[in-house]
Image (cartoon, rainbow, N blue to C red):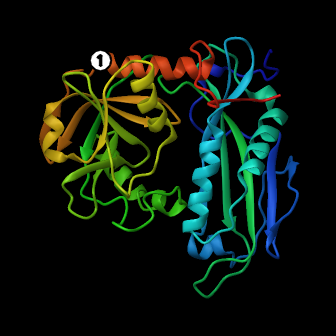
Amino acid sequence: MMCAKNIDWSNLGFGYVKTDWRYVSNYKDGQWDDGTLTGNETIVMNECAGVLQYAQTCFEGLKAYTTSDGRIVCFRPDLNAERMIDSCERMEMPAFPKERFLEAVKKTVAANREWVPPYGSGASLYLRPYMFGSNPVIGVKPASEYQFRVFATPVGPYFKGGVRPLTVRISDFDRAAPRGTGHIKAGLNYAMSLHAIVDAHEKGFDENVYLDPGTRTYIEETGGANILFVTKDGKVVTPKSSSILPSITRRSLVQVAADYLGLTVEERPVSLSELESFAECGLCGTAAVISPVGKIVDHGKEICLPSGMEDMGPVTKKLYDTLRGIQMGTVPAPEGWIMEIE
């Protein structure tokens, strides 16, 4: 399958590029309409729409790839559908049914297949399903009408010119409240992280590491990714908490570690005091799979991981290569992980 779009895939960034088609479905009078593809990227809504007044919105992120044998596939979109249902329930929004979510993803990718980057380019077609309250709401209450949409945008390879391990800091800000919305993908979680990430960048850090909001003694996650650690004896450790977003990439890496690489995996609370005992650290997410961390700074105290500032650590690299291989079709996938686009 050849891509028809004349794009320099290797020099694409991670930004919005308008593609030809997006999927739209509206909820009104207690039900979703049939949904349709549209070429129109603009949204027109009332000035008092629930999303504008009270941030009633949630979203997902996933990718479509070209595999080594030329198929177009998505990676575990069923988990995105399920997580969005969880987000909707917490935000008092009507869930978009799982089968319809998967159908919307398939239709959006199929309609934009000319925008799916070729195998080996390092690029992919990023998909953004999202939903928002669309009717006027002035009292503080849920909207009664909603719009669900999926758009696609091609994005370049995350590691341009090779891997650069990140320098992160322990943040003084909290990402989520103890019994708040940290476990769902609500737009408001990201709005409240913007000041913290701008401040981190201004001070020379790549990301914030947030502590648990209750006691501020345990590692949670960063502004946009779950965290994964490797111990000096090769165990994979991921923080466990009720206010962490359940990353699909992190859950997949944990399974790859145990089933493909035979590693011991621990999902448990990780205390701040443990950081100096780890050999490797990575940030897990859709964009990069794993971004290696070389240095963690805790209020002036530098914790330099043995894996260093030049490359991924050896275990992190194996995890990255295996999961990328599964996504690209060069490593056999567990059943149900790959959805092919016809």
At horizontal 86% and vertical 46% (from top left) the residue drawn is 39
Of 239 and 147, nearer the camera is: 239
- Measuring from the top left, give residue 6's x and y in whole percent: 77, 20
Regarding residue 1, the answer to whether it shows in the image is yes
- Measuring from the top left, give residue 225's x and y in whole percent: 42, 43
Left or right side of 140 for 256: left
- Measuring from the top left, give residue 7's x and y in whole percent: 72, 22
Regarding residue 160, the answer to whether it shows in the image is no
Q: Amino acid at mark 1?
A: Glu
Quadrant of image for the N terminus: top right
Of 2 and 248, nearer the camera is: 248
Residue placed under numbered mark 1 in the picture:
310
The image quarter in which residue 330 lies: top right
The image quarter in which residue 196 lies: bottom left
Secondary structure of the residue carrying tag 1 is loop
Left or right side of 117 for 187: left
The image quarter in which residue 12 lies: top right
At horizontal 33% and vertical 66% (from top left) the residue drawn is 178
